[in-house]
Image (spheres, rainbow, N blue to C red):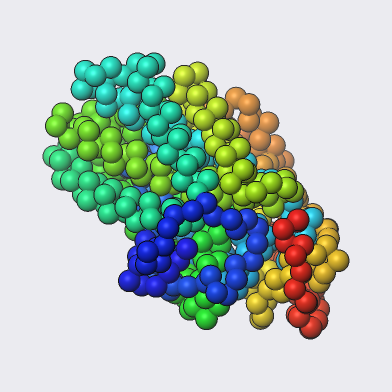
Amino acid sequence: MITPPDQPDGRAPDRKLRVETYGLDVIADTERKGTPRTLFWPWFGANVSILGLGYGAFALGFGISFWQALAAGVVGIVFSFLLCGFVAVAGKRGSAPTMVLGRAAYGVRGNRLPSVISWVLTVGWETVLCALATMATATVFGRLGWGGGTETKIVALVLVGALTVVVGVMGFDLIMRLQTLITVVTGVLTVIYIVLVADHIHWSAVSAVPAGSAQEFIGALVFMMTGFGLGWVNAAADYSRYLPRTASSRGVIGWTAFGASLAPLLLLVFGLLLAGSSADLAEAVAADPIGALTTILPTWFLVPFALVAVLGLVGGAVLDIYSSGLALLSAGLRVPRYVAALFDGVLMIVGSIYIVFVADDFLGPFMGFLTTLGVPIAAWCGVMLADLALRRRDYDEPDLYRPTGRYGDVRLTPLLLTLTATALGWGLVTNSTAAWLDWQGYLLHPLGLGGRSGPWAYANLGVLTALALTFLGTLALHRDRVHQQETLTPSPATDEGARL
């Protein structure tokens, strides 16, 4: 759990590792400790992945210049992780997981729909990260002549999957220790990687990449938001809930956003320079983002590179599997937290098998996954942020588990806002590279935006539309409800949290 500053890994002195028993429970005041700056470790460790270099190629793939891609990346990364910081404040104010705190807006059982969406997103992300770690290992072994075929992939998948599942099942204490180790090891090795491949950067080629349109810039910006902060916003309070109530809200926002943004910003800049210098490398990244980056490395650094790649990806997958388990419980599954995490781990391994051994394309399904789930998550985020902004008091924690309490059972207004915003959002995004999503974009022609092949087809306005619509709608329609809730006297304690 988050502990005093002299224990940056979140480990109390002489504390033995054990399986975390907390599920959806409110964290007791006696268990809340630490300062906001301890949030740096899990967020940096989860986002220091070498995959950040691949986003340089992804951004340029929208047909924009280096400077446009850089601007889109900086704004998209920082803004989206600031959203995570704001949601993290709810954890400090409510002592419960993110998807439990959402009950204040949606109602105790009404929040099950957002919980299911959150669960699908986190399981999807952990699957992508596990698969990438497997492919990276196989690529490195192949280059070293140690075999990079099916047998290597199977062994790598078993090891990566086992590490991710074990840490996710053990829970918060081991996660904080692992994330500190990942932060240090991957931070150092990533710097060495950058130094070794710096001579592959050719500024003349990078600066010659032509500029794209405003619509293409917006598309890259939204892709960065969905690939970074909007992929984490539904889990942002899962770690700040261990902080004392007196912790600085500004500190929670700042350390969350800083820890999460620092590595992606640095990696993005270097990834843009590499991809802009070589069209062949940029194309290879689309098929195998991590493996393609090994092709420009000296042989002696391949093993350290595999280590930094796998650890960085595992760091993200571990946080995802922990939060996916909590989301599954919030959706209504009544099992211990570690059982939910184990179940999600099985799904992660099955999904990774498909990506590694069956799918012949990574970027198309990946972009389709991000933009499709990015719309409802953005809609949920707008409701959550507006609800949090309207509150002047901390959450009434017992009522977060009572359908008959102040937050109610099912709140139709936020649910209808979320569903409406999602429907509008999906009508304003397209995914031509994922055939199973070709039904999206159905509003582009009626609204005069050129249809599915017009200039706005790939701007993915649906994500921004969903976020803005639910945020403004909640501010306008939810204010009186929040005021009524906060005029009620505090509720007595209850043990219903173990059941709902």
Looking at the picture, tell me which residue is in the foreground, 229 or 334. 334
- Give the quarter of the figure containing the C terminus: bottom right
**Image point (38%, 51%), residue name:** 178
Residue 110 position (above or below residue 280) = below
- Residue 451 location, x and y as percent? 63, 36
Is residue 93 visible in the rendered image? The answer is: yes
**Image point (40%, 47%), residue name:** 315
| Residue farthest to the right, as pictured | 404
Horizontally, is 89 left or right of 469 in the view? Answer: left
- Residue 174 location, x and y as percent? 43, 53
Horizontally, is 125 left or right of 153 in the view? Answer: right
- Residue 115 location, x and y as percent? 68, 50
**Image point (65%, 37%), residue name:** 441
Horizontally, is 289 left or right of 421 in the view? Answer: left
Q: How many marks?
A: 0
Instruction: Please tell me in which quadrant of the rendered image residue 42 appears.
Output: bottom left
Instruction: Please tell me in which quadrant of the rendered image residue 26 appears.
Output: bottom right
**Image point (65%, 49%), residue name:** 336
Is residue 269 visible in the rendered image? The answer is: no
Residue 440 position (above or below residue 151) = below
Looking at the picture, tell me which residue is in the foreground, 55 or 135. 135
- Residue 37 location, x and y as percent? 39, 70
Looking at the picture, tell me which residue is in the foreground, 318 or 436. 318
